[in-house]
Amino acid sequence: MLNASTVTLDQGATHIGAAPTLFPDAGTIIDVQENRFPIRLGVENRRIRDLFHNATRSQWNPATDIDWDQLHPEQYTDEQRRAARMYWSRRAWGEYGAISESPALQIRFCHEHCPPDMALFFAIRSQEESRHAEVCFRMAEALGGYYDQPAAVAFQGSVASHGIRKVALDPAISLEGTIAALVCAAEEIAFDVFRHLSEITVNPVARQVVKAILRDEVRHCAFGWAFLQQRMPQMTAAEKDVVRQAVINMMEKVELNGYHSSWLAPASPSSTDEMLVDEITHQAGLGATTEALERPVFLKSIASMRQRMGEEWGIEIPMFHHPKIDGPF
C-alpha cells in the first residue's frame, strides 16, 4: 500500500545523493578565448538542417494543446493520484535536466566550429525540453500537486543528473563520444520506452502528453545518428574507441543505475517505493509502466543500439550485466 509517508518529502533532507559521474574531473572550455569568425551559416549537414526546419513547424503548447479537461482526476483514488503525482514529477526532473544540456552543447558546437546546422537544431531542442518539463509539471499539478524532489534522499543519486552538462564543456572528452552516449544510447532507450508508454497508457490526457513528447524525441534521436554518420568516416580507430567507451560509461553508470527506470536503481527501500509508484500509476492507466512490461522493451532497445552501432560505425558494444536481469544482455 502506498501511503502519504511514502511520497511525502523529508523536510530535513539535504541534497547529498551522489549523481552518477561519467568521466573524471577536468577543466572546461569556458575560459578559452573564443575564435568566432568566420561564421558559417550554410547547410553542411542536410539531414540535421531538415530536422531543424521540421522542429520549427512542429511546435505545441503544453497549456493549450493538451485536452486537460479530459483528465478527470476525481475518478481516481487518493493513492492513485498520489503515485501519479510522484511519477510525473520524476519525469519533470529528468526533462528539466535536459534543458541545460542543450546550451552547454551549443557552446561546444561553436567552440569546435561544428556544422552550423547543429547549433540551430539545438536551439529548438532547448525549447522542446522546456516544453516537456512544463507538460510533466502540469500533469503532476493537475493530479493534486507537483513534488520538487524525490521523497527519499537515497534515490536522488539515480535521478539527479547524468553529467552531460559537465562533459559537454570538457575538451578532453570528444564531442562524438558525448553525442553517442547521450543521444544514440540514452535517448534512444528513452524513446523506445516512451513508444511503449504510448501503447499502454489508458488515460486520454496522459496518453496525449506521452505522444506529444514522443514526436519531439524522434527528432532528438535522429540528430545523433545524423551527426555520427557524417563524422565516423573521418575518425581514427583510437577516436572511435573513445566513442565506444563513452557509450559503455553511459550504460553502466547512468542507465543501469536507474536514471530512466526506477527498477534498475540500486536496491534500497527508496527504489522499492519508486517501483510501487510506477506500479500504481500504471494500474490506474495514468502513464507509467512496470518492470515486467518494460524489461523486454529495454533489452530490445539495447540489442538494437548494439547492432546499429556495429553495422554503421564498426563499433562493438559489449554485453552488459545487472543484478535484476538474468545473464548478459
Image: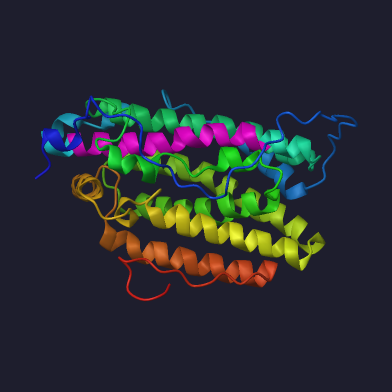
| Quadrant of the rendering where the C terminus is positioned | bottom left
x, y percent for residue 37: 89, 30
Residue 184 vs residue 41, the one in the foreground:
184
Give the farthest residue toward the bottom.
327
Q: Residue furthest right?
A: 38
104 falls in the magenta region: yes
* Towards the viewer: 112 or 204: 112
Q: Is residue 67 visible?
A: no
Residue 262 % position (x, y): 31, 50
Quadrant the N terminus occupies: top left
Residue 327 picture location, percent across and down: 36, 76
Q: Quadrant of residue 62?
A: top left
**Residue at x 40%, y 42% (from the top left corner):** 18
Q: Where residue 305 appears, x then y in whole percent?
A: 54, 64
Residue 171 in sight in this render: yes
Q: Residue at x 18, y 46 (%)?
A: 280
Identify whether 223 is placed above or below 149.
Answer: below
Q: How is the image coloured?
A: rainbow
Is 43 a magenta residue?
Answer: no
Identify the main secondary structure in magenta: helix
Residue found 58% across the figure and 55% down from its top: 184
Position of 235 with respect to 148 (left or right) is right
- Identify which residue, 58 or 280, lies in the foreground: 280
Q: Which residues are magenta?
A: 82-105
Total numbered labels placed on residues in the image: 0
Q: Is residue 132 left or right of residue 241?
A: left
Point 72% across, 59% down: residue: 229
Q: Quadrant of residue 300?
A: bottom left
